[in-house]
């Protein structure tokens, strides 16, 4: 079982939320400062942003190994679109850290979203 922080289309109500069917929702969460979102069109990409002071808002889930493998495929790990990484969470009684997906391609010129994906 793995704690996963999701911040875009995997959140409840998002276009890809069905990938989390049968997994355990722990609650809302936020990363420590140092991350921000950019719009990739129909989904966001989270990147490290050393000057950020807000962090990124999202949800914390516990997923099984089969679900994690599906998420890896969805996020394009084999294609190098995203990488799975550990992220520290803002003070949260549910967990101090979780795994998440960071966008790995150049983001310069993409529209900045900030700390929360509302798409």
Image (spheres, rainbow, N blue to C red):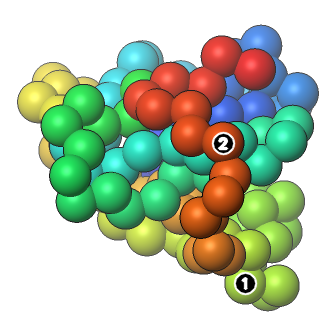
Q: Is residue 43 above or below residue 98?
A: above
Q: Quadrant of residue 22?
A: top right
Number of numbered discs on residues? 2
Q: Is residue 5 left or right of 76 when viewed as pictured?
A: left
| Residue at mark 2 | 111
| Marking on residue 116 | none
Taking the spot 66% from the left edge, 42% from the top edge, the residue there is 111
Task: Judge left or right: residue 44 versus residue 70.
Answer: left
Looking at this view, is 110 or 11 the one in front? Answer: 110
Label 1 vs label 2, nearer the camera: 2
Label 1 packing within 10 angstroms: few (<14), some (14-19), many (20+): few
Front residue of this view, candidates 11 and 2: 11
Q: Position of residue 4 (x, y in %)?
A: 49, 48
Residue 40 placement (x, y as % from top left) = 77, 49
Considering every residue shown, the one lying at the far front of the view is 109
The residue wearing badge 1 is 80
Question: How far from the left and from the top, in percent, is residue 8?
Answer: 66, 34
Q: Is residue 91 visible?
A: yes
> Which type of secondary structure does the marked residue at label 1 adopt?
loop
User: Toward which corner of the image does residue 23 lie, by quadrant?
Assistant: top right
From this viewpoint, which residue is outermost toward the left? 91
Q: Residues within 10 Å of mark 2 (few under 14, many from 20)?
A: few
| Quadrant in the picture for the C terminus | top right
CA gap between label 1 and label 2 equals 21 Å
What residue is rendered at 25% in x and 44% in y? 52
Q: Quick check: marks 1 and 2 in contact, CB under 8 Å? A: no
Q: Earlier in the sequence, mark 1 or mark 2?
A: 1
């Amino acid at each position: 079982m793995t704690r996963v922080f999701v911040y875009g289309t995997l959140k409840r109500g998002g276009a890809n939320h069905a990938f989390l069917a049968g997994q355990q929702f722990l609650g809302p969460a936020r990363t420590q400062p140092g991350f921000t979102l950019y719009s990739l069109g129909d989904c966001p990409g989270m990147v490290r942003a050393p000057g950020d002071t807000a962090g990124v808002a999202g949800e914390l889930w516990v997923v099984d190994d089969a679900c994690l493998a599906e998420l890896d495929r969805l996020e394009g790990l084999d294609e190098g679109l995203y990488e799975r990484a550990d992220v520290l969470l803002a003070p949260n009684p549910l967990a101090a850290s979780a795994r998440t997906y960071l966008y790995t391609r150049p983001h310069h010129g993409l529209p900045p979203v900030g700390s929360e994906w509302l798409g």
